[in-house]
């Protein structure tokens, strides 16, 4: 008998983590960071609801931090098994986890200076570079479409999820006696027509499906409308004489923004701007994209074949050092800053917000999901004052929420993807808040007549 137990992203969007038990083995699907504010940070420090030393193997869907961010903590606390990931995901993991370790160490160093002056004991970061190195030594890269054995009687295969480079749908076959059961874990499903990335692969059969549900209760705008909105924001910013700050995730969103800039460089008159990718991590991710351009869709490959690198523009500058980044604060107008973090809760974007939010002519373009208790969510929600680096700043800049660039499929996309399953297997919805999950579950029942359930923490289901 095989079972699955939900230990993360069960009623929320971040912290993906699910435990499969089969034939005396334990296989973890993802081990992601819980993202948000201080409360979520504290939850990441808690003990796992299972013994990491008892987990025999891990299959990783993709390299976003809410899916891979606690891998170093897992090995720090005793995990010693292999980690299977698509080849591009393996490369991206190194970039993401090293950055997370650096941030954790820097944050703790700042806190410890205050604690030392108060006579308090120093704190330790969640994990360090040594833990990241241990994760990298355990990674086993696999190609899309390559069926591989995890244990005797347990095999897996990864297919393109259309979400970010290397993102995978995981098929897991488990043989127990004469019976074989199949679990399909969607990972994060992307929308059709995403630039650079291929469309999500259809899967035709399963005994149980774990389906993400981030936008299970809404439909996205047409991407063409969103791209036109980006043009309008840039035009408005040019007329108002201000800068444009774009908080963007280092993996996926930064690259898509650059792609659209390259595609519309002439008709948007982008030569009139100074464009900065102020994110060392996003710059490293661009290098990974270049190494794995065999995974690009036909449009991106054709653009590359004709000698137009979508990540190079005449006036685009990749900013690496902190000193270079600080000098950008001298720009009062005519600059576009693409910087992390995507939810404005860390990284260099906070410096750009500090120097631009109070300016009436400035513009902030929100291009990704903003979790609760983040600075980005406060801006989206229209707060008139916000705290940045312990300073209260009045929001005079124009805030634009550009929602059509999501790397997650909307309700229609999720329904279409599930519709490829010919046998209409039961579904457990993960990676979504309850409002989105409840609407999607009802829609699945109505249209396909399938069982649709909402996962809950520690809930266990037989496969």
Image: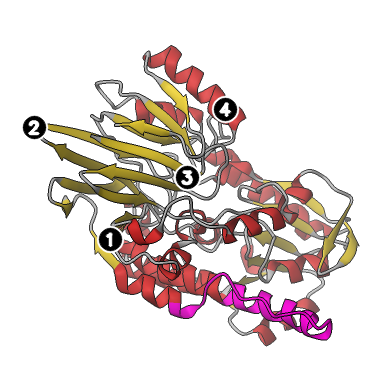
Instruction: Look at 58% across and 35% down and name the residue there.
Output: 221
Q: Are marks 2 and 3 in contact (CB under 8 Å)?
A: no
- Please name the residue that numbered disc 4 is placed on: 217
Q: Residues within 10 Å of mark 3 (few under 14, many from 20)?
A: many
- Please name the residue that numbered disc 3 is placed on: 7
| Secondary-structure class at tag 3 | strand
Residue 6 appears in which quarter of the rendering? Answer: top left
Q: Percent from the top left, x then y, of residue 95?
A: 45, 71
Along the polypeptide, which appears first: circle 1 or circle 4?
4
- Please name the residue that numbered disc 2 is placed on: 178
Residue 85 appears in which quarter of the rendering? Answer: bottom left
Q: Tell me how far mark 3 sits from mark 1, CA to CA.
A: 34 Å
Q: Tell me how far mark 1 sits from mark 4, CA to CA.
A: 34 Å
Q: Is residue 302 visible?
A: no
Q: Residues within 10 Å of mark 2 (few under 14, many from 20)?
A: few
Residue 294: give its label.
1
Left/right placement of residue 43 relative to residue 30 reads right
Q: Are marks 4 and 2 in contact (CB under 8 Å)?
A: no
């Amino acid at each position: 008998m095989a079972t699955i137990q939900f230990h993360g992203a069960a009623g929320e969007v971040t912290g993906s983590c699910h435990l499969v038990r089969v034939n005396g083995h334990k296989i973890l699907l993802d081990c992601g960071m819980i993202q948000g504010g201080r409360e979520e940070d504290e939850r990441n420090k808690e003990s796992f609801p299972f013994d990491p030393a008892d987990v025999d193997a891990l299959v990783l869907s993709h390299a976003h931090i809410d899916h891979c961010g606690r891998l170093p903590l897992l090995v720090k606390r005793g995990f010693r098994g292999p980690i299977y990931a698509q080849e591009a995901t393996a490369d991206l993991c190194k970039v993401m986890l090293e950055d997370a370790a650096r941030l954790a160490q820097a944050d703790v160093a700042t806190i410890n200076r205050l604690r030392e002056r108060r006579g308090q004991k120093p704190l330790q970061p969640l994990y360090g570079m040594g833990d990241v190195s241990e994760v990298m030594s355990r990674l086993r890269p696999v190609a899309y479409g390559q069926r591989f054995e995890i244990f005797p009687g347990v095999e897996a295969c990864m297919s393109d999820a259309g979400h970010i480079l290397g993102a995978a749908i995981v098929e897991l076959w488990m043989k127990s006696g004469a019976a074989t059961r199949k679990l399909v874990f969607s990972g994060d499903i992307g929308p059709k027509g995403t630039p650079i990335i291929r469309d999500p692969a259809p899967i035709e059969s399963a005994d149980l499906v774990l389906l993400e549900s981030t936008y299970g209760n809404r439909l996205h705008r047409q991407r063409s409308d969103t791209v036109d909105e980006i043009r309008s924001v840039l035009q408005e910013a040019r007329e108002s004489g201000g800068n444009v700050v774009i908080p963007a995730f280092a993996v996926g969103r930064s690259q898509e923004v650059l792609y659209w800039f390259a595609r519309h460089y002439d008709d948007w008159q982008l030569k009139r701007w100074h464009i900065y990718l102020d994110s060392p991590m996003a710059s490293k991710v661009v290098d990974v994209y270049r190494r794995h351009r065999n995974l690009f869709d036909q449009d991106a490959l054709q653009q590359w074949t004709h000698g137009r690198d979508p990540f190079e523009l005449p006036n685009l500058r990749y900013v690496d050092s902190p000193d270079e980044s600080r000098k950008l604060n001298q720009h009062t107008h005519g600059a576009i800053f693409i910087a992390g973090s995507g939810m404005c809760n860390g990284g260099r974007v906070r410096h750009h917000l500090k120097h631009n939010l109070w300016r009436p002519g400035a513009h902030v373009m929100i291009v990704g999901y903003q979790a609760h208790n983040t600075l980005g969510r406060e801006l989206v929600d229209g707060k008139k004052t916000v705290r940045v680096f312990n300073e209260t700043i009045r929001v005079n800049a124009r805030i634009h929420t550009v929602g059509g660039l999501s790397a997650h499929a909307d309700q229609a996309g999720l329904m279409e993807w599930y519709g490829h399953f010919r046998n209409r297997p039961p579904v457990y919805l993960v990676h979504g808040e309850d409002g989105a999950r409840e609407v999607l579950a009802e829609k699945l029942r109505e249209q396909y007549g399938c069982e649709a359930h909402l996962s809950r923490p520690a809930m266990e289901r037989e496969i």
